[in-house]
């Protein structure tokens, strides 16, 4: 390959904005600022605006490490794991939208604007939504409309409304639309009654209409329209109020899971204790709980771990977990929505702009992976053979604690019954076959039957090569 | 000067004037309703949400108030 503008160390998602780019220096993320952005950067720094946002916890704090005529380099605080918008629960998404509006309003009052309002500019860090693109600001030009307004609608308001009216899985549409869901699509999917809501009508339906009317205009003369600062503030204040009170009407399927399952109190306690003992022996600091529901078992290890990722297929359980984190002000737990049978792929330009879940997990290098009462779902609902799931876990985890519900477990029974005439195809679902196939990738270190239950807890260590 | 590295959408720029006008009415009526309700003591207490207000200074001032009252 010939010389390209993108140096190999430059972060693959960092090319859209000419103001600067993100690069990795000895594993540390640094942001390089180009001279074109020096005036903005200097003003943002000297006016105390950056500091103010850091203090409010709205923008990821950074330190300036280099300041020359050719470039300024800043080093932002380390974020352990980046979650993408299509991996957020409704509440997480809503908070990300509110943070974006807050940052823009703060900017406006100090003579700046948020020049882009992409959902990828927000992520979750230490339990809270935080804005991560320090170069997303520009000077406010008197009487100019907000140029990132449409982006805010297609990245935030649109997906949130679709989730409200059609279920939280609509948020996954963002996986197909890296630049936000098209206005036309949002408008056509929203129910007719939304036209009678003044906020939804103007911000979505009217906007979509005007956008298609002017889509043939290639002159891009944005001077055509003027908007006072007060008017712009009205738009964002109103959007903030509206999004603040947005709710979804979905019954929690799993929220109360632990009260519904067949788990005996004693068995629950024993599982908890085994988990604690094993994890503390391993001195695990970075943990991922795959299929971790509302984070009940992840939380058991809270005291010993620095960072606990909890994924679940059920966005409501993730929501429940996120609300707990907000309530308890927990900083080390990060929940996200993920279907293990279909983890987030790599998307965007060159298929490298937003990395896949597996790539991010490999980068994270968790010391310990928990897969508690998950294997029967993978194997029996997903029809994934043991060898395949072993390969999956081995791709990112060195140590795996896996809970295996045996054939006599009531969940397994009900999953098997649903196979009807194909039930015999699943005769392989037993401990012996599991141990045999998992031992291709893992060494069985411990094995404990959880009493008063039909479940076995395994401690597995990845084999070299 | 703006660096237009993505298309802000001309329609979206024009639409903002109308959206702002409607938003102003919505905000005004909300404020009026709030005042009427507060006369009759009907305002619900704040729910637990860390995102109460869009304004930074207001939040900071509130936090300071809480700190001093503790």
Image (cartoon, helix red, strand yellow):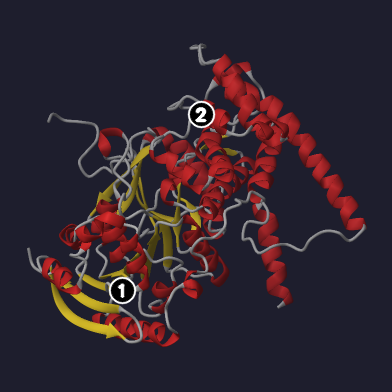
> Residue lying farthest left?
A465
Who comes first in sequence, dot 2 or dot 1?
2
In the rendered view, tell whether residue A47 sits above or below residue A429. Answer: above
- Measured in 3D between alpha carbons, the distance from the residue under mark 2 to the one under mark 1, in whole angstroms, is 44 Å
Disc sitting over residue A202 in the figure: none
User: Label 2: how many residues lie within 10 Å, few (<14), some (14-19) or many (20+)?
Assistant: few
Instruction: Give the residue displayed 31% in from the left and 49% down from the top.
Output: A342
> Residue lying farthest right?
B39
Q: Can you tell which quarter of the image residue B68 is in?
A: bottom right
> Residue lying farthest front?
A421
Location of the C terminus of chain B by quadrant is: bottom right
Q: In the image, residue A286 lies at what x, y percent?
A: 31, 69
Viewer-proximal residue among B49 and A200: A200
Whether residue A392 is visible to the viewer of this picture, yes or no, is no
In the rendered view, tell whether residue A99 sits above or below residue A272. Answer: above
The chain letter for the residue carrying disc 2 is A
- Identify the element where label 1 is drawn: loop
Instruction: Give the residue displayed 60% in from the left and 19% down from the top.
Output: A210
Q: In the image, residue A128 lies at what x, y percent?
A: 50, 60
Whether residue A39 is visible to the viewer of this picture, yes or no, is yes
Label 1, on which residue? A285
Q: In the image, residue A14 lies at what x, y percent?
A: 33, 39
The chain letter for the residue carrying disc 1 is A
Label 2, on which residue? A185
Q: In the displayed structure, does residue A19 sit left or right of residue B25? A: left
Q: In the displayed structure, does residue A245 sit left or right of residue A436? A: right
Q: Nearer the viewer, mark 2 or mark 1?
A: 2
Mark 2 touches mark 1? (CB < 8 Å): no
């Amino acid at each position: 390959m010939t010389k390209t503008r993108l140096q190999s160390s430059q972060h693959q998602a960092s090319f859209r904005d000419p103001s600067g780019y993100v690069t990795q220096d000895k594993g540390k993320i640094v942001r390089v600022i180009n001279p074109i952005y020096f005036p903005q950067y200097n003003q943002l720094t000297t006016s105390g605006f950056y500091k103010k946002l850091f203090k409010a916890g709205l923008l990821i704090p950074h330190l300036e490490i280099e300041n020359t005529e050719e470039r300024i380099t800043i080093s932002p605080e380390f974020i352990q794991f980046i979650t993408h918008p299509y991996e957020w629960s409704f509440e997480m998404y809503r908070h990300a939208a509110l943070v974006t509006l807050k940052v823009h309003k703060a900017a406006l009052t100090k003579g700046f604007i948020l020049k882009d309002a992409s959902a990828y500019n927000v992520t979750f860090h230490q339990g809270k939504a935080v804005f991560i693109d320090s170069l997303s600001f520009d000077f406010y030009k008197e009487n100019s409309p907000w140029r990132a307004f449409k982006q805010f609608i297609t990245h935030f308001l649109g997906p949130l409304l679709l989730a409200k009216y059609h279920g939280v899985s609509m948020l996954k549409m963002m996986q197909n639309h890296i630049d936000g869901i098209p206005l036309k699509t949002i408008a056509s999917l929203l129910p007719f009654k939304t036209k009678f809501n003044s906020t939804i009508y103007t911000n979505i339906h009217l906007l979509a209409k005007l956008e298609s009317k002017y889509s043939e205009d290639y002159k891009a003369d944005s001077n055509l329209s003027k908007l006072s600062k007060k008017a712009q503030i009205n738009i964002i204040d109103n959007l903030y109020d509206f999004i603040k009170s947005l709710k979804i009407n979905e019954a929690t399927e799993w929220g109360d899971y632990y009260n519904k399952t067949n788990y005996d109190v004693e068995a629950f306690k024993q599982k908890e204790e085994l988990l604690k003992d094993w994890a503390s022996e391993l001195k695990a600091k970075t943990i991922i709980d795959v299929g971790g529901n509302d984070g009940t078992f992840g939380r058991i290890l809270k005291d010993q771990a620095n960072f606990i990722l909890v994924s679940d297929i059920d966005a409501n359980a993730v929501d429940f977990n996120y609300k707990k984190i907000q309530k308890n002000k927990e900083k080390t737990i990060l929940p996200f929505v993920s279907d293990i049978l279909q983890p987030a792929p790599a998307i965007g330009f060159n298929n490298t702009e937003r990395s896949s879940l597996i790539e991010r997990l490999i980068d994270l290098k968790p010391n310990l992976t928990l897969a508690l009462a998950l294997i029967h779902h993978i194997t029996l609902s997903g029809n994934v053979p043991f060898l395949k799931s072993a390969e999956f876990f081995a791709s990112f985890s060195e140590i795996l604690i896996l809970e295996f519900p045996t054939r006599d477990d009531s969940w397994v029974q009900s999953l098997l019954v649903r196979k009807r005439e194909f039930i015999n195809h699943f005769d392989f679902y037993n401990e012996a076959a599991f141990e045999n196939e998992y031992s291709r990738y893992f060494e069985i270190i411990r094995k404990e039957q959880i009493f008063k239950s039909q479940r076995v807890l395994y401690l597995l260590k990845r084999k070299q090569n | 000067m703006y660096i237009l590295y993505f298309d802000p959408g001309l329609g979206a720029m024009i639409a903002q004037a109308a959206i702002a006008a409607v938003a102003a009415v919505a905000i005004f009526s909300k404020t009026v309703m709030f005042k009427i309700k507060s006369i009759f003591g009907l305002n619900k207490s704040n729910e637990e949400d860390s995102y109460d207000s869009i304004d930074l200074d207001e939040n900071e001032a509130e936090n300071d108030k809480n700190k001093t009252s503790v």
